[in-house]
Amino acid sequence: MVQGEGMGGRSLVVDAVTHRYGTSVAVQNINLDIRAGELVALLGPSGCGKTTLLRIIAGFVRQTEGRIILADDIVDDLPPNRRQIGIVFQNYALFPHMTVAENVAYGPAAQGVAKAAREAEAKRVLELVRLGHLADRLPRQLSGGQQQRVALARALAIKPRILLLDEPFAALDKNLRLDMQIEIKRLQRLSGVTTVMVTHDQEEALSMADRVAVLSQGRLEQFASPLDIYDRPQTLFVNTFVGTSNQMPGVVTGPAGDGFAIRLDAGADIIAQAPAGGLGPAARATLCIRPEHLELCDDPAGFAAVVEMGLPLGPTVVHEVRTADGLGVKVAEPRRAGTELRAPGTPVRVRVAAPGLASAYPLLPS
């Protein structure tokens, strides 16, 4: 449950923000309405504009157009130190000559908080991140995960209106990264602070965020819950960037309920949704379907293929099959204990596991 204003969160509005570096457009007409206490992930590949947008929110970059509104206050003319924003950088940026407690108390000290009060606040947030027993240590005496929690405690100590996380797990190994994702999610819920996190890791975004903003080439592709991003992607980019998706060409043969009937070049008729619209009669289309939404079958209505290989991945088997028109397609199925993998060269038929699981988009010219 998202916590509200009374729990310490503040709303954040990114209103029609555009930023240009000379003639290059870094972000274009971005609109985000982030609720108080919400954790939002800015997700996209390198160069999509997510870090630029984070720096604009922080006040490090002044946008070319648009407004940043924190809790109903337009903050475009405020420098970073007056926006009351906490930031956790990718490299943590701890002061090496200061103890953990001194690092955490630095922000309140810069705000003019009295010594006794800032020491009490440092103690409180260190207990919150479970590092109270390490208050007298120097950063070099801590593990990577502990340093990250100190950086988080330092950001929380200033009682920020907004918390910004800039690729906060990039320097951690895989096992520690998962532990810290859970820890930061816990702390964000306890503090109720509105949080914006930049990441290129889709699993990280989908597992942690209340909503995800997917960016591509400076544009906002979709802003929705993780489940909607995965199950109901609105654009071809979102469908192929988030998760794994097979792309299969075909032609529209007519409307079908709320969607369209697509005749695949591989030789089957599929009912698909068209989130972006724009599919006219006889239009060429790209059908996107996730491997787990396909199944191997004996149904003659499915399309014919030949097994090239099977990859057992714990409880799942991913089959790589080749269609009659030469297209490689992945099919993911539950693995039954004791069942042998299908041998390469085995002929199979493939169908969509349930109606409405495929999405169709206008076929882009190659």
Image: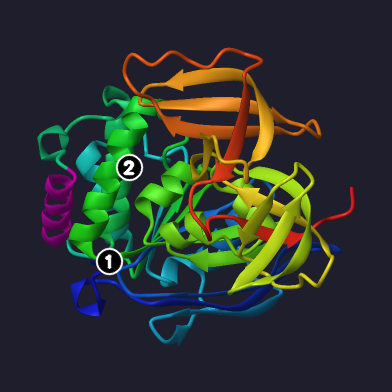
Q: Residues within 10 Å of mark 2 (few under 14, many from 20)?
A: some
Q: Is residue 159 left or right of residue 198?
A: left
Which of the two residues, 25 or 77, is positioned nearer the viewer here? Answer: 25
Task: Where is residue 300? Give x, y as percent.
Answer: 62, 41
Q: Residues within 10 Å of mark 1 (few under 14, many from 20)?
A: few
Which of the two residues, 268 or 81, is positioned nearer the viewer here? Answer: 268
Q: Is residue 190 left or right of residue 211?
A: left
Three-letter residue code for mark 1: Gly
Considering the numbered disc 1 on the image, is that residue within a helix, a strand or a loop? loop
In the rendered image, is residue 171 in sight? no
Q: Is residue 286 left or right of residue 77?
A: right
Name the image quarter holding residue 281: bottom right
Task: Where is residue 7? Give x, y as percent.
Answer: 19, 72
Give the Cα distance between marks 1 and 2: 32 Å
The magenta segment: 115-129
- Quadrant for the N terminus in the image: bottom left
Name the image quarter holding residue 299: top right
Is 194 colored magenta in this rendering? no
Q: How many marks?
A: 2
Considering the numbered disc 2 on the image, is that residue within a helix, a strand or a loop? helix
| Image colouring | rainbow
Three-letter residue code for mark 2: Gln
> Residue under circle 1?
112
Numbered circle sitting on residue 181: 2
Above or below: residue 141 compared with residue 215: above
Above or below: residue 192 compared with residue 335: below
